[in-house]
Structure formats: structure tokens, C-alpha cells
Image: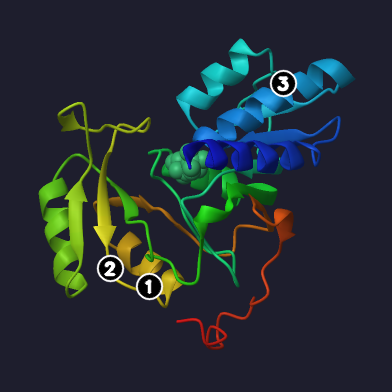
Amino acid sequence: MQDYANYYKRQAAAAGIELVETGMVVGLGSGSTSEIMIELLAERVKQEGLDIAAIATSVKSANLAEQLGLRLVTFDQYVSIDLTLDGADEIQISRLDLIKGLGAALWREKIVAACSDRLVILADESKIVTYLGQKSPVPVEVAQFGWQTTRHHIMELFDGAEAELRHKSGKALVTDGGNYILDCRFGEITEPEELDMLLTTLPGVVVTGIFCRFAEHAIIAGEEGVRMIEPIVTDYDQSDAGLA
Ligand code: 5RP
């Protein structure tokens, strides 16, 4: 099963890097699919002599890109990005709303997504869902200071919500930004944009892993081959095509 998933991730990544053109500033995502994408992109850059600049969404992706010879730049040099290729934990099929952050890079990923002309999500088909929250918790990055009260507020604000502090090797996981992550469950998320806005009104919340209106396309690889999907519902005022 894992082998299939890796094969599909590679296929999605291989299709994604074909969108890169010489002269572009490219956003590099985080996670296993993005790591495959970075490897394939570095090969293509070498083989074809492409001139690209890259901005990474995590220290891990930056280190990998540097090792493989990609030219990393910073926001000192560029304030916008032409194309970002990134993974996701859930992709809502009709709107391409996303849950991201199981790899803990959500803050940088959202900053990069927000300044990208195009965000293209690369994933195997297991990431497709009909509503957000179907499989994955929503990672919420919170300040270390007072994280307990932020957790309490989240659970108080949303009846029945669960919020669990993420751990790694027996300790609270600290993100690249120096924060903690609460993995939250809200049941079926029918209004993700509203949930995102409400959560970010809490002073201890830095960013949530709900990404609405960011993805231009998703490249999904699976049994049916590689598909390039675009949002089919873009009007957030209307009901969600009966999917909720
Ligand atoms: C990291 C992310 C990743 O894009 C997401 O977790 C997908 O990872 P993978 O490609 O390993 O399934 O949001 O913060």
C-alpha cells in the first residue's frame, strides 16, 4: 500500500515539475511528496540548465534543496512567487480547500501560498475528501505562551471540538517558527473559511492548517492515472453543491 502511495506521489511530483519554467521564482512545499518534487526538480534544473530561484516552506525542504544544488533566495530578494508546488493532507474535491500541516510547516506554507501567483497541490488520491475533517485533524499552530488557555478557548468556542498538543519523541513538537501545534477535530467541517477566520481571532492562534481559495489546481495521481483538477465550486456564498 505504502509502495503504491509513494509511486503515486512520484507521479504527481513529476507532473508538477513540468509546470516550472526558466526565470521563475518557485515555492517549494514540505512533506514527503514535496521532497520527491524537490529531487525531481533539481534533476530537471541540472539536465535542462533552467535558471530558477526557490523559496522553501520549511528548514527541511530548504536543506534538501540546497544539498541538491537549487538556488535558494529569500523574501529580501523577492516578495512574490510565480509558482508553488506543495502537498496537502486533505483536498476537498469541489473547491480544492485544503488541510495542511501534518508535517508541521503550515505557517510558512500559508505565507508562501498567499504570495504565490499559482499554488499547485501534488498528491496521491488518498488525500481527496468530500469535506474537510473527514480523515485528518486540523493542525492549528499556537504560541507556546498560554497554549493551555488557547486550547481551552478552542474547545469552548466549538462545541465537541477536541484539541491535542502534538508531540515528537516524547516532547511537545516545536515548529520552525518556534510554536506548538494543536491537532484539532471539529467533526465534519462544512464552512472551512469561517472556521479558519474564527480560530484566527483567538490571540494565541498563529495560523490554522485550513487553506481556502489558495489552490489553483491539484495534480492527483492514482489508479486512474494523473489528473489535473481545478475548483468547480468557487462561489463561497452558495451551498457547497450538496457535498456537506
Ligand atoms: C506539511 C504539509 C504537507 O504538505 C502535508 O503534510 C502532505 O505531506 P505528504 O506529502 O508527506 O503526505 O502540509 O506541513
Label whose residue precedes the other's in the sequence (3 or 1): 3
Q: Quadrant of residue 157?
A: bottom left
CA neighbours of label 3 inside 10 A, class few (<14), some (14 to 19), many (20+): many
Please indicate whether residue 149 sits to the left or right of residue 242 in the image.
left
Please indicate whether residue 99 sits to the left or right of residue 74 in the image.
left
Q: Residue at x 18, y 51 (%)?
A: 164
Q: Quadrant of residue 101?
A: top left
CA neighbours of label 1 inside 10 A, class few (<14), some (14 to 19), many (20+): some
Q: Quadrant of residue 53?
A: top right
SS under mark 2: loop
**Residue 47, image x, y percentages:** 85, 17
Which residue type does callout 3 highlight?
A: Ala
**Do we see residue 109 in this rendering?**
yes
Residue 186 - label: 2
Please indicate whether residue 145 sits to the left or right of residue 129 in the image.
left
Does 215 sit above or below residue 170? below
Which residue type does callout 1 highlight?
A: Ile
85 and 110: which is toward the camera: 85
Where does label 1 land, which residue?
Answer: 189
Where does label 3 land, which residue?
Answer: 42
